[in-house]
Each structure stands twice: as C-alpha cells, then as structure tokens.
Image (spheres, helix red, strand yellow):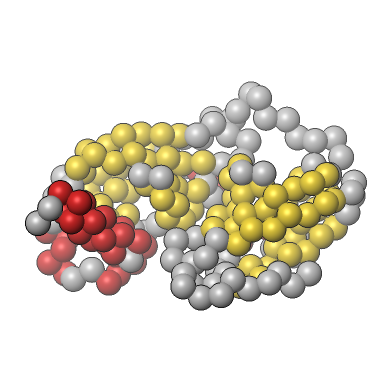
C-alpha cells in the first residue's frame, strides 16, 4: 500500500468513526479513544466544537450516539462562541481511553456589539448546523429560530454560511437596513444532492 493510499484509508476511517460513531462496530471501542468536553455555563454548552478543523456540533449535544470518538494520536480541539476567545487544546488520544477536557470560554475584549441592529430569524434543517456571518462563527441554527430567538447583526451587506458535516454548505448574501427583520428558511441538502434555494 502506497503512502498516499494509507493516508486516504486512515482519513476514511476517521471520517466514519468521528462523524458517525453510532455506525462503528462494537469492537472499534477497543481501538478508538473518547474525548469528553465539560463546561459549566450555557456559553460553553452552546459553543461550537471543531476537531482537526472539522465542525462536529455544539458541546451540549456531543454525547451518547454523538460522543467524540477519535483514532489514537494527536488531535486539535477548538471550541468557539461569538463574542468569546477561541478555546484550543492539543490532545493525545489513546486506544480505549477516555480523555476529559474542561472548557472555559473567556470574553473577547475586542468584541463590540453594534449600536443599531438588523434581525435575522433562521428556520433551517438540521437545526444543529453551524452559522457563520462574514466568515465568523456565531452559533448553531437552533439558537436563532422559534419564539423570541433571532440573530442580531450590524446592518449592511452580510454573507451568511450554514454548514454541517454530511451536508452541502449553504451560502447566501443579504443587504440589511437598520431595524430590518429578515427570515431565512432552507433545508440543507445531503452531500451529493442539489443545493436548495432559500425560502424568504
């Protein structure tokens, strides 16, 4: 097996076990290690989690069938939340061992809320997808839909990206005036399918 083939094989298994742990056979737990993330406040629990640059979901949901199972070796964990500094940690995962990391998000002193807002309400499936505004992670869809929940942004031209592993990334651009209320509805397409148009 060539070096390139070995790398492709390893990445394929990592994709299967990390992103779809419920599909892994029972004996895989003898090879994979588990990473558990703990946080005290709603800020940590609602923060997005990346492993080796791949978005997995928000912290509160990464347990049970969605727990983080990784191949042995070094991995980089990143936890992000709008208005807070990124939490990053490099860990060494060992076979069949559980590693617990306590996450504490610290407010970013450079973050400033705009004096005037525009409001975006999201109705997107799946609602666990990550939401980015102008390239910055702001939360997951479920935080910005339903009663009394919306995304507040500065007026002007905004690029909105909605992303989740296993689905086609959705991109759109909007021009917002002060105090405008804008609704974005769409269903993310499974990878390999056609990207849906937004319903406004």
Residue sitting farthest toward the top = 109
**Left or right of 140, for residue 104:** left
- Eyeballing the image, is 6 above or below 86? below
Q: How many marks?
A: 0
Where is residue 34? Give x, y as percent: 25, 52
Q: Residue at x 27, y 37 (%)?
A: 91
> Looking at the image, which residue is at 46% across and 70% down?
191
- Percent of width and height locating residue 155: 83, 44
* Viewer can see residue 31: yes
Is 50 or 43 nearer to us in this picture?
50
Position of the C terminus by quadrant: bottom right
Vertical placement of residue 27 versus 67, above or below? below
Q: Nearer the viewer, residue 68 or 171?
A: 171
Residue 173 lies in quadrant: bottom right
Q: Nearer the viewer, residue 187 or 44?
A: 187
Q: Position of residue 77 (x, y in %)?
A: 37, 41
Examine the rendered structure and indicate whether residue 36 appears above or below residue 123: above
- Which picture quadrant has residue 68? bottom left
């Amino acid at each position: 097996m060539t070096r390139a083939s070995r790398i492709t094989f390893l990445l394929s298994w990592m994709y299967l076990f990390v992103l779809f742990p419920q599909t892994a056979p029972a004996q895989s737990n003898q090879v994979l290690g588990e990473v558990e993330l703990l946080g005290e406040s709603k800020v940590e629990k609602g923060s997005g989690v990346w492993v080796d640059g791949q978005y997995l979901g928000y912290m509160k949901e990464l347990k049970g069938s969605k727990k983080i199972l990784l191949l042995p070796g070094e991995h980089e964990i990143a936890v992000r939340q709008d208005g807070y500094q990124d939490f990053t940690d490099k860990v060494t995962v060992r076979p069949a061992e559980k590693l617990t990391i306590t996450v504490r998000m610290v407010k970013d002193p450079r973050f400033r809320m705009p004096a005037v807002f525009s409001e975006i309400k999201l109705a997107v499936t799946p609602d666990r997808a990550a939401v980015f505004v102008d390239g910055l992670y702001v939360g997951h869809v479920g935080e910005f839909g339903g009663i009394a929940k919306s995304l507040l942004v500065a007026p002007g031209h905004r690029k909105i990206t909605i992303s989740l592993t296993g689905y086609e990334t959705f991109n759109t651009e909007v021009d917002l005036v002060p105090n405008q209320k804008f609704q974005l509805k769409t269903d993310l397409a499974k990878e390999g399918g056609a990207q849906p148009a937004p319903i406004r």
